[in-house]
Image: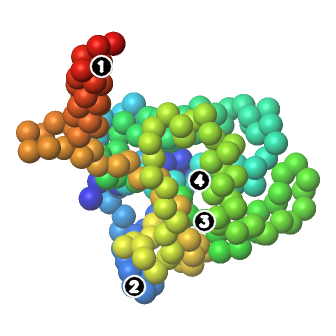
Amino acid sequence: MDILVACHNEATDPPLFKYLSPRFDTPVPLVADYVDPSGGRRWTDYGAETKDIIWEQYCPIMYPFEKVANYYNYYPDHKSIFYDLFDTGWKILKPGGRIVIPFPNDFASFRSFPRFHWKPIDVETALANFKSVLKSILSRHPWIVRIVPRSSMPFIISERDEQDRYDMYICFVKPVPRTNNSGIEMVNMTRKSKRRRHCRSRKYTGE
């Protein structure tokens, strides 16, 4: 499995490990590539459809979950990071691949900005907020979004002994195109069939 860890510099950040299900209690050396907008390897270092998973690690991902008003006015540099994650990430992922975002056990551990008070939030509400704030970015591609409990994860990536911080994971999945026996995408076939039916209907009615 080809894994890309986003927003993590393997040269300067703490090492990451893979924890396997079902116990998630034993650190296994992680074999992965890394990309970090503040240094290290870049998104352009990776080719199209080369990765199965993009695991988000330290991106500034939590503020959109809280539906921060005028988010990009506060963090104008973050927009390019999210475009890389969800636009360039789409190109890098193989069909069926996914972006994985760990969601904290207790979202109240994050300070609500700009009000600066503790505000617990459930994962469904947080995801709706996230999709609302990043609507223009997420709408560029037909992501399938899933909330996956810890118990259903095949593995967890984290720093040593930090794997228990999360009990939910939000996955943005790149769908696998449906094809016919000739390998042609069914979406294109459907559009062509609709055009042919429309033309036949116009000819029959004399329009």
Label 2 near label 1: C-beta < 8 Å?
A: no
- Sooner in the amino-acid sequence: mark 1 or mark 2: 2
Say what amino acid the circle numbered 2 marks: Pro
Instruction: Judge whether 171 appears above or below 79 on screen.
Output: below
Say what amino acid the circle numbered 3 marks: Phe
* Percent position of residue 148, x then y: 49, 69
Cα distance, mark 1 to mark 3?
A: 57 Å
For this orientation, the residue located farthest to the top is: 207
For this orientation, the residue located farthest to the left is: 182
Q: Secondary structure at mark 1?
A: helix
Say what amino acid the circle numbered 4 marks: Tyr
Cα distance, mark 1 to mark 2?
A: 63 Å
Q: Residue at x 38, y 48 (%)?
A: 174
Report which residue position mark 1 lands on: 205
Cα distance, mark 1 to mark 4?
A: 61 Å
Q: Secondary structure at mark 2?
A: loop
Say what amino acid the circle numbered 1 marks: Thr
* Percent position of residue 146, x then y: 49, 61
Location of the N terminus (image quadrant): bottom left
Report which residue position mark 4 lands on: 58
Q: Secondary structure at mark 4?
A: loop
Instruction: Judge whether 39 appears above or below 59 on screen.
Output: above
Using a 10 Å C-alpha cutoff, classify the residue at mark 1 as few (fewer than 14 neighbours), some (14 to 19) or many (20 or more): few
Q: Nearer the viewer, mark 2 or mark 4?
A: 2
Cα distance, mark 2 to mark 4?
A: 25 Å
Q: Residue at x 30, y 19 (%)?
A: 205
Location of the C terminus (image quadrant): top left
User: In this orientation, which residue lies closer to the viewer: 149 or 14?
Assistant: 149
Tell me the quarter of the picture where residue 200 sits.
top left
Report which residue position mark 3 lands on: 103
